[in-house]
């Protein structure tokens, strides 16, 4: 076995670079406190401290503050993790549950149970359902702020963080279900998942089919199973996820982005001042990653959101998401060929069988969701055999976070969910097939098409016959012969050959001047998909700097309802570009001063030739490092 050496990362925290970064953060915090003086005049003299106190409140404290009773329960999984569940056992006036089945909520990636209650009783679905007579339970996945215990391991040990999405789905959820059904003396529960909460449910249902009968109904908010068409800039990080996992394994034993006091201070200062809140927290983080919604997003919640997010997880979880994106397969965690062979009896990890899920499911998605793109949701929808409904939120700017924190969340999200639960909670209710599709959820065309502003429509776009110069932003099934040019955040040129199953594929992204040559194996017919294999060009800092304008433009919605939206979006785009361009320049200045460069996914520490050689050894032995960490004993 190769001996792998790594850069002395601990030395970094004692270096002058670290001191300079701390100085920069300190100056930024000082500037923010100055900016906040204009806000304090409209609040109490202790306004910043009040924000900090609210930011540091736990889920239990937030629920209590809103006038509801709350219970804390602990569940032990089959593999020894101790999970904390939060329960709202009665309504605000103390009435016990009157509905037939409890409701289980599961949070998003890097989030916790707090995400469901930050908006308060007026907008929190959990509290509203408690008032409607439901027994409400909130999950906390292993490794987050509330579920960091184990029967034999300490969270500071590397072995504790050896889990991916698969373990959350196959261990955490079944343990929680069994406990809740036992405590409530019921046989079924309703499941409401948001983002990652939907991902782990699909994994559970596919891998633990014995639990499908215990789910009365499932509601997926911003469902995530595929990332083929995700428009969020996080897609540019996916190629680096493996190296980031290795780095986190060495630096923090695999723990990534835990909730810390420093982040709470950031939330109450940077995200508390009007100017820095808009520039950094709203536009530079939330809107940039999740999609812009200047019409309905509740900006008053930003300090609370940023104070409770992120809540920590294993570095294997984001890598698992990245593998789904890069492989375009909703499958199990890829440990590498050797470990895969030991675990799966195959060099490639198996895919989850979504068609085996017999749970009645409702999908709710947003048109402007950069993470869970409409086309990926439609792909998921086509594989679910017991779909109740697929509902597009009635807001053309609905982004990934509007499902919890929109000013109109009651009208757009909560009320439709309540209606679905009223139907499915009836003891006499039985699944009888999907609801009729609404016109807005289906869009199909045929013949020669120039899609133009209709790109990003709600559903599949099926194109048949001879097509030429097609500009689309939807699911495209191409049959028959013809030369097709598809533009979707770049230029994609496909020229057919005489063999229907083999086509020459040449892709060039005009923004990044990236080109590659691959092979596509396509199958004719609706619902088929193409598997693209080949090598791509990884992004780096120069790529972001060169294409920053286009990357941001791709994340912005098209103005639809109001004439002045275009002006608002253009101003927002310009602000985001200015902010991120300054951030890139700062990173470049640090790299130049300390002789650091980032080339591809490999961090090259070039201060000395000795350290540089160590880094090259890390890259050469990355697979061996992961194999050592995840090798099955014996």
Image (cartoon, rainbow, N blue to C red):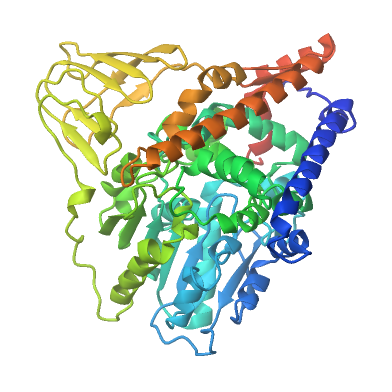
Query: Which residue occupies 58% across, 38% down?
Result: 284
* Quadrant the C terminus occupies: top right
Q: Quadrant of residue 78?
A: bottom right
Where does the image place residue 252, in percent across and percent down from the top left? 76, 41
Where does the image place residue 238, in percent across and percent down from the top left? 53, 31
Query: Which residue occupies 53% across, 73% down?
Result: 121
Query: Which residue occupies 49% across, 30% down?
Result: 552
Q: Nearer the viewer, residue 501 or 464?
A: 464
Is the residue 233 above or below the residue 64 in the image?
A: above
Where does the image place residue 309, in percent across and percent down from the top left? 63, 52
Relative to 92, 598 lies left or right? right
Is the residue 34 above or below the residue 112 in the image?
A: above
Is the residue 148 above or below the residue 596 in the image?
A: below
Query: Which residue occupies 78% across, 13% down?
Result: 606
- Residue 237: in sight, yes or no? no
Q: Quadrant of residue 82?
A: bottom right
Relative to 342, 533 lies left or right? left
Is the residue 467 above or below the residue 238 in the image?
A: above
Q: Nearer the viewer, residue 130 or 217?
A: 130
Relative to 421, 15 lies left or right? right
């Amino acid at each position: 076995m190769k001996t792998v050496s790594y850069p002395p990362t601990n030395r970094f925290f004692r270096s002058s670079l670290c001191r300079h970064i701390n100085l920069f953060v300190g100056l930024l915090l000082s500037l923010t406190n100055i900016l906040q003086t204009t806000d304090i005049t409209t609040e109490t003299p202790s306004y910043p401290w009040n924000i900090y106190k609210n930011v540091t409140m736990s889920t239990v404290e937030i629920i209590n503050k809103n006038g509801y009773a709350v219970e804390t329960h602990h569940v032990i999984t089959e593999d020894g993790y101790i999970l904390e569940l939060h329960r709202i056992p009665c309504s605000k006036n103390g009435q016990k549950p009157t509905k037939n089945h409890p409701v289980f909520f599961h949070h998003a990636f890097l989030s916790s149970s707090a995400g469901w209650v930050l908006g308060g009783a007026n907008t929190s679905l959990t509290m509203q359902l408690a008032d409607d007579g439901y027994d409400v339970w909130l999950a906390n996945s292993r490794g987050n702020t509330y579920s960091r215990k184990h029967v034999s391991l300490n969270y500071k040990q590397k072995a504790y963080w050896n889990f991916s999405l698969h373990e959350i789905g196959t261990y955490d959820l079944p343990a929680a279900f069994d406990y809740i059904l036992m405590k409530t003396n019921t046989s079924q529960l309703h499941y409401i998942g948001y983002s990652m909460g939907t991902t782990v449910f699909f994994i559970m249902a596919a891998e633990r089919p014995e639990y499908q009968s215990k789910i009365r109904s499932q509601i997926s908010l911003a469902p995530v199973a595929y990332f083929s068409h995700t428009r969020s800039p996080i897609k540019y990080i996916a190629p680096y996820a493996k190296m980031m996992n290795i780095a986190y394994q060495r630096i923090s034993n695999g723990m990534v982005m835990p909730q810390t006091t420093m982040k709470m201070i950031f939330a109450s200062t940077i995200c508390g001042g009007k100017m820095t809140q808009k520039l950094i927290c709203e536009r530079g983080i939330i809107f940039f990653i999740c999609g812009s919604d200047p019409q309905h997003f509740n900006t008053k919640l930003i300090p609370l959101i940023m104070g409770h997010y992120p809540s920590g997880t294993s570095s294997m979880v984001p890598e698992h998401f990245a593998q789904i994106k890069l492989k375009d397969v909703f499958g199990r965690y890829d440990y590498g060929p050797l470990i895969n062979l030991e675990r799966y009896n195959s060099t490639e990890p198996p895919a989850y069988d979504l068609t085996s899920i017999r749970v009645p499911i409702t999908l709710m998605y947003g048109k402007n969701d950069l993470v869970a793109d409409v086309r990926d949701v439609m792909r998921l929808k086509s594989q679910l055999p017991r779909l109740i409904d697929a509902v597009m939120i009635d807001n053309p700017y609905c982004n990934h976070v509007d499902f919890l924190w929109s000013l109109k969340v009651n009208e757009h999200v909560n009320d439709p969910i309540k209606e679905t639960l009223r139907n499915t909670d009836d003891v006499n209710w039985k699944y009888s097939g999907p609801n009729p599709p609404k016109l807005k959820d289906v869009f199909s065309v045929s013949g020669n098409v120039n899609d133009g502003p209709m790109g990003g429509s709600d559903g599949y776009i099926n194109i048949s016959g001879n097509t030429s110069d097609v500009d689309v932003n939807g699911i495209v099934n191409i049959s028959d012969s013809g030369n097709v040019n598809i533009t979707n955040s770049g230029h994609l040129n496909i020229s057919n050959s005489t063999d229907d199953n083999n086509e020459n594929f040449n892709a060039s992204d005009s923004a990044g001047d990236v080109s590659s040559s691959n092979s596509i194996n396509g199958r004719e017919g609706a619902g088929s998909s193409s598997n693209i294999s080949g090598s791509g060009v990884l992004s780096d800092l120069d790529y972001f700097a060169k294409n920053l304008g286009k990357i941001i433009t791709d994340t912005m919605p098209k103005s639809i309802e109001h004439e002045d939206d275009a002006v608002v979006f253009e101003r927002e785009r310009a602000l985001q570009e200015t902010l991120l361009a300054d951030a890139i320049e700062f990173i470049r200045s640090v790299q130049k001063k300390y002789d650091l460069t980032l080339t591809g996914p490999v961090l090259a520490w070039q201060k000395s030739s000795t350290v540089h050689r160590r880094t090259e050894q890390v890259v050469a032995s990355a697979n061996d490092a992961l194999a050592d960490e995840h090798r099955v004993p014996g």
